[in-house]
C-alpha cells in the first residue's frame, strides 16, 4: 500500500509543485483582491453586499422603480416584478441611464409574465438617498436614472 493509504493517489514531484503553485496563486490573488479589489473582482475581491455598515452621519442609497399605469395611477413597482432581483437591477443602472429603452424591454417581459398586472405607460428608475445625522433620517433625495415612456 502507498503512503497515502489509497492506491494510485501518490502525487509525482511535478504534480505536487503544480498543486502548490496553484494554491499559492489563488491565495495571492485572494489577498491582493482583499487589499485593493472591488466587488467586480469577485471571487478574488470582496463581495461587500451586506458586509459594510453606514456611518451614523452617512447616506443610505437605494434604487426604486416608479411608474404610471395606462389609466394614470402612480405606482411603485417591485423590481422583482420585472424578473430581476434588486442586485441585478442595480448592477445595470449605468446601462439603463445610457439606454432607457432597456426599461421598455423589461416592461414587455413583465406584461408577458403577468398579463393581469396593470399595464404601464411610463417607468422611472430612481436613485434614492436617505441622509442620516446621528443615525436619524434628516433628508431624502430622489434622482431619476432613466425614464421610459410607452410609444
Image: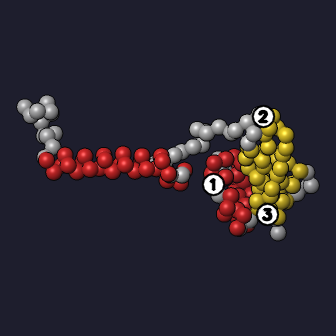
**From where the camera sits, is residue 117 visible?**
no
Depth order, front residue of 3/136: 136
Estimate the x, y position of residue 143 in percent, counting from the top left. 80, 56
Q: Are discs 2 and 1 less than 8 Å apart at CB?
A: no
- Label 2 close to label 3 by CB (< 8 Å): no
Whole-percent x and y of residue 100?
Answer: 74, 65
Q: Residues within 10 Å of mark 2 (few under 14, many from 20)?
A: few
Q: Earlier in the sequence, mark 1 or mark 3?
A: 1
Residue visible at 78% across and 34% down in the picture? 134
- Mark 1 or 3, closer to the camera: 1
Does label 2 or label 3 sit earlier along the sequence? 2
Task: Work out whether residue 124 or residue 35 is closer to the camera in this orientation and state it.
Answer: 35
Q: Which residue is mark 1?
A: 91
Task: State the CA–CA distance, disc 1 to disc 3.
Answer: 18 Å
Residue at image mark 3: 148
The label on residue 134 is: 2
Give the residue drawn at x 74%, y 58%: 107
Q: Position of residue 73 (x, y in %)?
A: 91, 51
**With 69 as the anchor, is 45 left or right in this view?**
left
Amino acid at each position: 500500500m502507498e503512503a497515502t493509504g489509497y492506491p494510485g493517489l501518490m502525487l509525482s514531484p511535478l504534480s505536487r509543485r503544480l498543486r502548490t503553485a496553484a494554491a499559492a496563486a489563488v491565495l495571492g490573488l485572494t489577498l491582493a483582491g482583499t487589499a485593493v479589489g472591488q466587488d467586480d473582482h469577485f471571487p478574488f475581491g470582496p463581495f461587500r453586499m451586506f458586509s459594510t455598515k453606514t456611518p451614523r452621519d452617512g447616506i443610505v442609497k437605494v434604487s426604486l422603480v416608479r411608474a404610471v399605469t395606462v389609466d394614470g395611477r402612480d405606482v411603485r413597482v417591485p423590481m422583482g416584478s420585472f424578473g430581476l432581483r434588486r442586485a441585478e437591477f442595480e448592477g445595470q443602472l449605468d446601462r439603463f441611464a445610457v439606454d432607457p429603452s432597456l426599461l421598455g424591454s423589461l416592461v414587455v417581459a413583465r406584461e408577458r409574465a403577468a398579463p393581469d398586472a396593470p399595464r404601464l405607460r411610463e417607468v422611472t428608475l430612481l436613485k434614492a438617498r436617505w441622509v442620516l445625522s446621528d443615525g436619524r433620517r434628516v433628508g431624502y433625495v430622489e434622482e431619476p436614472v432613466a425614464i421610459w415612456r410607452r410609444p
